Image (spheres, grey):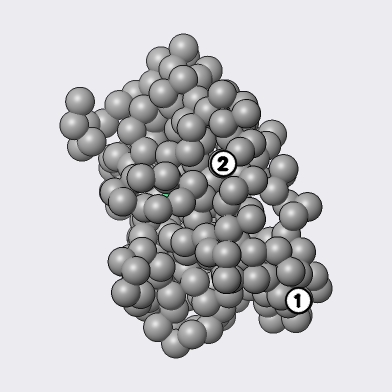
Amino acid sequence: MTSDTLVLLSSRELEKMRNAGRLAAELLNHLEPMVKPGVSTLELNDEAERWTLAHGAKSAPLGYKGFPKSICTSVNEVVCHGIPNSKQILKEGDIINIDVTPIVEGFHGDTSKTFFVGTPAPKTKKLVEVTEECLRRGIAEVKPGARIGDIGAAIQEYAEAEGFSVVQNFAGHGIHRIFHTVPEILHYGKRGTGKRLRQGMVFTIEPMINEGTWEVEILDDGWTAVTQDGKLTAQFEHTVAVTASGVEILTLP
Ligand code: MF3
Ligand code: CO
Ligand code: CO
C-alpha cells in the first residue's frame, strides 16, 4: 500500500487505533510530572523510550526519515520537530510541546500537548489556551459529510480573532499502519472546500499557533522548525476517527 491511498478503517482496525491512541495519551500523562525547571529534553526522551518499550510498543519517530530520537520536544519558539538534547534544560516560564507516537500492534497513536514549565506569563498562557481551543474547535467540525476545509476554517477563524497566526508549513495527516498519509488536514482554509469526510477515516488535527508571524524556518539540523521572528508558538494534537454520527478522539487516556 502506498501512502497516498485513502483507507477507511474497519471496526477491528479502529479498536487497534484506540489501543495505540490510549497508550500515546498515557505516555504524555506519564511525562507531564517531569516537566519542571532543571530537566533536560533528553531526560524526557529517554523516559519516554523506556516507558514505551516497557509497554510493549515502539517509538515511531526514532529513525523515521532519519529523526534521531523517540519523541519531539519543541520549546518556546520551536514550532515542531524539536530534537531532545542533554544540553537543553527547561527553565521557569518556558513552554514545551511534547509530541509522542507509539506504535502498538502496527498501529500509530499520535498526540501532543504544550506544557508550562512553572508559571507562565499571562500572554504565554493565552497563546497556549487559544491553541488548545483551536484543536477543540477543529475536532468539533468532524462528522461524515463535512468538508476538510471546515476544520481549517474553524481553527483559522478563532486563532486570528484572538490575534494569533496559523502555521501553514505543517499539516495534520491520515494515520493508521502508516505514520503520515492522506488525507492532509490543513489548519487554515475555507468552509465548504476540500474532500468530504467519511466514516472510518482516521487522521490527526495538530494546529501550530504563533504569537507573531506564521512563517517558520528549519534549522541546520534539518528538523527543528522555529518561528521566523523568534516569537512563541504552541501546538496540541489528537488522532481522531470519523464515526457514523460524528467524531471519536482516539488519543485519550
Ligand atoms: N509526531 C509528529 C506529527 O505530529 C511527527 C514527528 S516526525 C519525526 O506528525 F520524525 F519528527 F518524529
Ligand atoms: Co501528527
Ligand atoms: Co505528533
Q: Work out which residue is located at the far top of the displayed protein and give it.
A: 12
- Nearer-the-camera pick, 88 or 239: 88
Q: Of marks 2 and 1, which one's residue comes earlier in the chain?
A: 2
Q: Position of residue 170 (x, y in %)?
A: 36, 60
What residue is shown at x 18% (from left), y 31% (from top)?
Answer: 2
Q: Amino acid at mark 2?
A: Glu
- Nearer-the-camera pick, 96 or 131: 96
What residue is shown at x 31% (from left), y 66% (from top)?
Answer: 222
Q: Quadrant of residue 113?
A: bottom right
Instruction: Tell which tag, 2 or 1, sits nearer the viewer.
Output: 2
Residue 184, above or below 123: above
Q: Position of residue 149 (x, y in %)?
A: 36, 53
Residue 69 visible in this rendered orientation of the protein: yes
Which residue is disc 2 drawn over? 49
Marking on residue 92: 1
- Cα separation between marks 2 and 1: 25 Å
Q: Is mark 2 within 8 Å of ligand 1?
A: no
Contact check, label 2 and label 1, Cβ < 8 Å: no
Q: Position of residue 155 (x, y in %)?
A: 50, 60
Residue 137 visible in this rendered orientation of the protein: no
Residue 244, above or below 81: above
What residue is shown at x 36% (from left), y 38% (from top)?
Answer: 179
Query: How would you rate the neighbour count of disc 2 (Cα within 10 Å): few for under 14, some for 14-19, many for 20 or more?
Result: many
Q: Position of residue 72 (x, y in %)?
A: 50, 55
Label 1: state its secondary structure. Answer: loop
- Nearer-the-camera pick, 48 or 154: 48
Residue 112, above or below 235: above
